[in-house]
Image (cartoon, grey):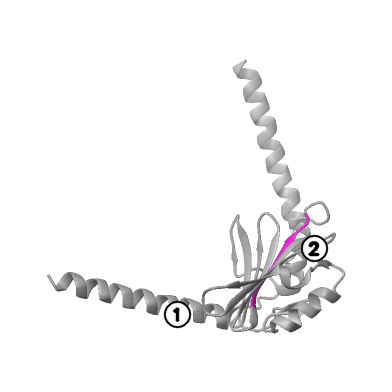
Amino acid sequence: MIMNMMRVLCVLCGFLFFSGLLWAQAAPAPAEDISTTDTLPRNFREISLGMGLDELKAALAEDPLFNFRGDRDVSFLPAREESLVETTGLSFVRRAFFQLREGSVFIMAFTLNSDQVDHYSIFTSLVEKYGQPNSLNPRQAVWETETTRLALERPLTVKYIDMAVFNGIIDESATVESAEIRRRQEFIDAF
């Protein structure tokens, strides 16, 4: 029994070792590092970061890849004039999400249909176009410049982020948190 288990384990280790060798040989060659230039896309098809809500709705309505139903796919979030557009896709795109702040798209996320396209194909294409990712872990691969972040997340989502707006939100959040910490300390000091 133990000998059979050891044989299976040896065969499995050998398989994994040779699979790793084959994968390493098939992996795309490293492309030029683009981390200091701004060559990442800010659009997918006719939809782009920075476009207004009316432009987004028109682009989604015209694009046969999406099943956009108009205003019923638009939600207004209570915080800071933010909107969320969520729509289903047809064929390659399962769902798409667009977050707007002050009337402009700053996040676009496309959950892809894994029956139609796979993670490795998307990753390989992105590496060929934009070079090796700035960061890579089991959950996501991220390409980033000063103005744009492009992420391929598992299981299969491609996300575009406008970094100027995103960093502004982080700065605002830090300011609010800092003021809250100061008020808390002032309250404690009052005793």
Image coordinates for residue 32, horizontal then vertical, percent:
69, 75
Query: What mark, if any, has residue 42 been given in the picture?
Result: none
Q: Is residue 154 magenta?
A: no
* In this view, 130 is above or below 136: below
Name which quarter of the figure residue 92 lies in: bottom right
Image coordinates for residue 164, horizontal then vertical, percent:
56, 83
Callout 1–callout 2 Cβ contact below 8 Å: no
Mark 1: few/some/many CA within 10 Å (<14, 14-19, 20+): few
Toward the right, the furthest residue is 64
Name the amino acid type tagged 1. Asp
Magenta segment boundaries in residue numbering? 106-113
> Residue under circle 1?
171
Toward the left, the furthest residue is 191
* In this view, 70 is above or below 147: above
Image coordinates for residue 141, horizontal then vertical, percent:
63, 63
- Quarter of the image for the C terminus: give it: bottom left
| Left or right relative to 136: residue 189 | left
- Quarter of the image for the N terminus: give it: top right
Q: Is residue 109 magenta?
A: yes
Residue 32 can be seen, yes or no: yes
Name the amino acid type tagged 2. Gly
Residue 46 can be seen, yes or no: no
Query: What mark, if any, has residue 89 been given in the picture?
Result: 2
Mark 2: few/some/many CA within 10 Å (<14, 14-19, 20+): many
Image coordinates for residue 74, horizontal then vertical, percent:
68, 71
| Left or right relative to 118: residue 168 | left
